Image (cartoon, rainbow, N blue to C red):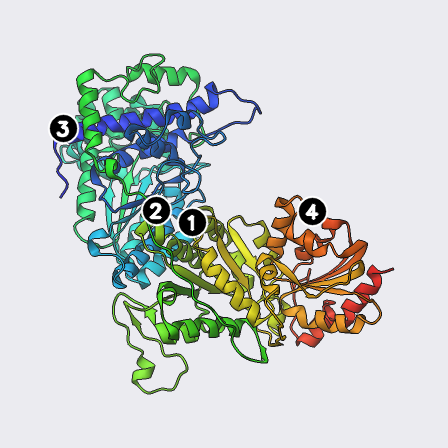
Amino acid sequence: MLPIIPETIAHLESLDTRLRWLSAWTIHNANHLRESRDGVKVGGHQASCASMSSIMASLYFAALGPNDRVAVKPHAGPLLHAIHYLLGSQSLEKLQNFRAFAGAQSYPSRTKDAIPVDFSTGSVGLGVAITAFASLFQDYLVAHGRLSPAETGRMIALMGDAELDEGNIYEALIEAYKHDLRNLWWIVDYNRQSLDHTTADRMFRRFDDIFETCGWRVITLKHGRRLAAVVAGPGGAALDTWFDDCPNADYAALTYQGGAAWRARLTADLGQAVAPILAAHDDDALALLMTDLGGHCMASLLEAYAQAASDDRPCLIIAYTIKGRGLPFAGHKDNHAGLMTPTQIEGLRGQLGIAAGQEWEKWAGLGDNQAAALQAYVAASPAATLPRDRPFDAVPVPAIPAPAGAEQSTQSAFGRILFDLAKAGGPLADRIVTTSPDVTVSTGLGPWVNARGLFRRQQMPDVFRQAKIPSPQKWSGQGSGQHVELGIAEHNLFLVLAAAGLAAPLFGTRLIPIGTVYDPFIARGLDALNYGCYQDARFILVATPSGLTLGPEGGAHQSINPPLIAMGQPGLTHYEPAYADELALLLHHAFGHVQAPDGESVYFRLSTRNIAQIQRSGTDWQAGAIAGGYWLREPAPGAEAAIIAMGALLPEAVAAWEALIDDIPGLGLLAVTSPDLLHRSWRQGLAEASHVATLLSPLRPGARLVTLCDAAPASLSWIGSVHGHRVVPLGVDRFGQTGDLVDLFAAYALDVDAIITAMATALR
């Protein structure tokens, strides 16, 4: 139970005021005082910070445990910077350069901010949802004996009420219920205003039911202590009912208008029922009373935290607040992106007793004794020992042999490689955790799950196996399991990968997350994929099946643009191997790459198409494959043409090369394993020094290229720009149709005849 004593309340209220001022001044400085060289509005969210300042002051300076992790509401980022400024872990220079180059970031960022940030936020809703999956992997590590119960904490999300419109929150809520998640707090800044307007009344009254149905404790902080006391007295019942029924827009407008408007409205609506209350308060006091909400009452907040901490049940705290509290535009429907004018900020500075020129002083406006006491309180508060990223060890990567077989697909090879790792055991196999959105079997993970099991906090028997019903899938669930089965929600897949990929810094143990999904559905979770990469979570994404080679399903199932997505996504390395030995080599590389200090997450685009494997005479090709491409058939010096192909279309490319080699002496065949890395090498290596430039250097100036991929032609067509070669690009730029590969490759100009025709066109 948190101690609630007057001195603590006084300190927290002072810190609330400090945070509100520092966040407002930081934003004001960026917009009105700092030189503007481009004339573009800098922005910031003074009102959004003001509504959250009480919650963050009480949480950080009184309630956080030593292992708690917090995802801060994006628009409350300046408050987090202000907290660290008071703690001495944020510099004045960074605050003065808020939203400037290399300054404090607009929204909390693990990768760009100098202060400790547990979870990046910015794309609203994702910072909330990832805390659910961070809680899942905290439990996972405890169950696997890699984290002691004493090292666990609560995963806490601070959100604005408008974020509850984000669908990914409910996808995560459902998945959290399935996995019986715990030690999870979501705290709602219920200020009843969004970016454009006040939030709808009708839906919010159902949120408590939704969360309670999913097993959450719901704590609603409606009235502060003063208002609660009045509600308990004469006329209070009528006022309480009126308060519940008052539309959000009306409440916001009355807050902005002030005491006289409150008096007129209450008199009109309730008359003599609230006469004793109105008589006991002048206009200023009435305005303070009617805006005395639970989300600004320190005692109420501390009691809520204590109640939430009484067990490990997930908890939703709905804290009623005022958007822009304490600022001149409090309650105004346009205050979300509003900025105080210089006159208004000067008025606020004077109100707080801060002398001109002392705006950045941490304890300005306080007497020496009060400043010293507050500083001592901060130094002894939970915020002074906020968790930092933990040290962790690298996981050794063993040799990974290619699966044997004259014909195989990259998807089947992937499944066999993982199964072999599972059987062999060892540190790498023990650190792998797999996940999939209800496509585990159809993406090749079935054998791995048979060997390693589902992760469940409670034992889950395989009922079919117990009943001796034959099935190739032998799935049981237990704490030692290493596969997290998800429902059909790609946002959850990428958030799970991000959370598991952050296990190393958050919990001190490196996990190697591998997630599988159908390649066309990457786009359904693209925002969450970008989010995971932005905070440098490390994971391996295996997208399969892909392209027209998926076969008869047709339509949007035959993916087109994921290679282009990968090429444009920072923090993600893309590979599209054609052969099993390429995949084994690149997986080995990926297991190390996701652990390297300068590494990235890795995306494999695989196929279900069985193709004939090729015989290798050495290992010279391997370095090139890792770098993005190698010559499968070396061109002769000064060759006039080359075929460039990737992935499951290599058989067509090989067949076309064999058909053309007698007519085009010296013809080369380049196997591309990563258009992403080739493009990067060209952009970063200043053309001539790049890997792709070196690869193409044997060709004569003006040589002709035919590029071939089961994806958008632009994935490879850019290669002509490296040395100015003419390119005829083949690929897919229309939605697919049903059919077998013979018909599909002919219809989309991907077969051998199309390659030969393209080469003839190129050589004209």
Sequence order check, earlier mark of 3 and 1: 3
Residue at 55% in and 27% down? 40
The residue tagged 4 is 688
Sequence order check, earlier mark of 2 and 3: 3
Q: Amino acid at mark 3?
A: Glu
Q: Amino acid at mark 2?
A: Phe
**749 relative position to 523: left or right:** right
The residue tagged 1 is 166
**70 relative position to 606: left or right:** left
The residue tagged 2 is 204
Observer-side mark, 4 or 3, equals 4
Q: Give how far across and how far down residue 290 sits, in percent.
A: 26, 30
Q: Of helix, strand and loop, which one carries label 3?
A: helix
Check disc 4: other Cα within 10 Å, few if <14, some if 14-19, many if 20+: some
Which quadrant holds the N terminus? top left
How far apart marks 3 and 1 lie (CA) works out to 39 Å
**518 relative position to 558: left or right:** left
In depth, the one of 649 and 632 nearer the eye is 632
In depth, the one of 191 and 427 nearer the eye is 427
Q: Of helix, strand and loop, which one carries label 4?
A: loop
How far apart marks 4 and 3 lie (CA) works out to 68 Å
Observer-side mark, 3 or 1, equals 3
Quarter occupied by residue 538: bottom left
Quarter occupied by residue 420: bottom left
How far apart marks 4 and 2 lie (CA) works out to 60 Å
Observer-side mark, 2 or 1, equals 1
Q: Amino acid at mark 1?
A: Glu
The answer to whether mark 3 and mark 1 are in CB contact below 8 A is: no
Q: Give how far across and how far down residue 648 sits, in percent.
A: 63, 69
